[in-house]
């Protein structure tokens, strides 16, 4: 039985002129596509997990109600990172396309995006220096470069790429997972800034009240606000989670 399956999967399959493969290669590539798509969907939550580790708290309910109770915020984080990657390293995609298709138009667009990249880097580095946190920009630029290279690896002949080019996406996944781990504080700081801007955490002042008389149950620095709980800093490193019910509401300053 196993020998028959092995013989079947080892058979050459001609996908088009000059492109052939076997069952094993197709299976590996299919699995890789699934893993890549899953990683992209999970990535914003991965950054949030790192932030929780640095801030020394954990929100179980974030992972209960389908990814996730704050999925809109997480999706927006990913969109912002992707847009920044395009502005910083979009020329990589155009130059890759120009080389493959021998297109003068793509070379011209690549040149334009080199200029866009330089201007955008200057702008964000100036903003980083002004805020006293230039390491944020280095982190974002590095991650953008990883994204751009990973995406460009899919820009070969689609059919040939489907069955042969699996190393680059794997490297992209490993690199995008490693960069935040090697820069825990910076990763947490970026996520914290996002939470703060949307008033759902990041240390903003908040209070949990009783609905019936507006009495304050607990107030303090808000670590994270989810549909089910409010996580507040307790002491220097501790935290308290307060369940959000129909009898309570949360005010955020």
Image (cartoon, grey):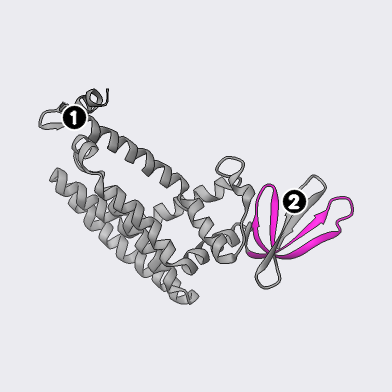
Above or below, 132 relative to 244? below
* Residue extending farthest left: 18
Q: Is residue 203 found left or right of 153 in the rendered image? A: right
- Upstream in sequence: badge 2 or badge 1: 1
Q: Nearer the viewer, residue 119 or 192?
A: 192
- Which structural element holds mark 2? strand
Where, quadrant-wise, is the C terminus in this rendering? bottom right
Q: Nearer the viewer, residue 44 or 100?
A: 44
Q: Residue at x 41, y 73 (%)?
A: 126
Above or below, 116 relative to 38? below
The spot of residue 4 in percent (x, y) is 23, 23
Q: Residue at x 60, y 64 (%)?
A: 56
Question: How busy is the neighbourhood of tag 1: few (under 14 within 10 Å), some, or many (20 plus)?
Answer: some
The spot of residue 237 in percent (x, y) is 65, 70
Observer able to see residue 87: no
Q: Residue at x 45, y 44 (%)?
A: 41
Q: Nearer the viewer, residue 241 or 69?
A: 241
Observer able to see residue 134: yes
Bounds of the magenta segment = 203-232
Q: Nearer the viewer, residue 108 or 225?
A: 225
- Which structural element holds mark 1? helix
Which residue is denoted by mark 2 in the rendering?
A: 243
Find out whether the residues at labels 2 and 1 contact each other: C-beta distance under 8 Å. no
Question: How busy is the neighbourhood of tag 2: few (under 14 within 10 Å), some, or many (20 plus)?
Answer: some
Which residue is denoted by mark 1 in the rendering?
A: 10
Was residue 108 drawn as part of the magenta stretch in this picture? no
Q: Residue at x 42, y 46 (%)?
A: 40
């Amino acid at each position: 039985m196993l020998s028959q399956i092995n013989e079947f999967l080892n058979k050459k399959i001609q996908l088009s002129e000059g492109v052939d493969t076997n069952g094993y290669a197709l299976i590996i590539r299919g699995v890789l596509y699934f893993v890549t798509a899953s990683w992209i969907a999970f990535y914003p939550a991965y950054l949030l997990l790192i932030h929780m580790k640095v801030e020394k708290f954990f929100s179980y309910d974030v992972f209960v109600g389908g990814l996730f109770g704050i999925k809109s915020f997480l999706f927006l984080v990913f969109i912002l990172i992707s847009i920044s990657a395009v502005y910083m390293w979009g020329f990589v995609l155009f130059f890759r396309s120009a080389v493959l298709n021998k297109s003068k138009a793509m070379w011209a667009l690549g040149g334009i995006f080199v200029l866009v990249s330089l201007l955008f880097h200057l702008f964000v580095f100036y903003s980083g220096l002004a805020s006293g946190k230039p390491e944020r920009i280095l982190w974002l630029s590095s991650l953008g470069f990883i994204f751009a290279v990973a995406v460009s690896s899919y820009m070969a002949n689609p059919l040939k790429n489907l069955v042969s080019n699996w190393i680059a996406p794997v490297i992209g996944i490993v690199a995008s997972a490693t960069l935040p781990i090697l820069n825990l504080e910076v990763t947490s700081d970026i996520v914290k800034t996002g939470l703060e801007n949307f008033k759902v955490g990041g240390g903003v002042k908040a209070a949990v009240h009783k609905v019936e008389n507006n009495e304050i149950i607990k107030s303090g620095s808000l670590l994270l606000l989810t549909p089910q709980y409010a996580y507040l800093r307790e002491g220097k490193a501790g935290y308290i989670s307060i369940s959000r019910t129909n009898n309570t509401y949360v005010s955020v300053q």
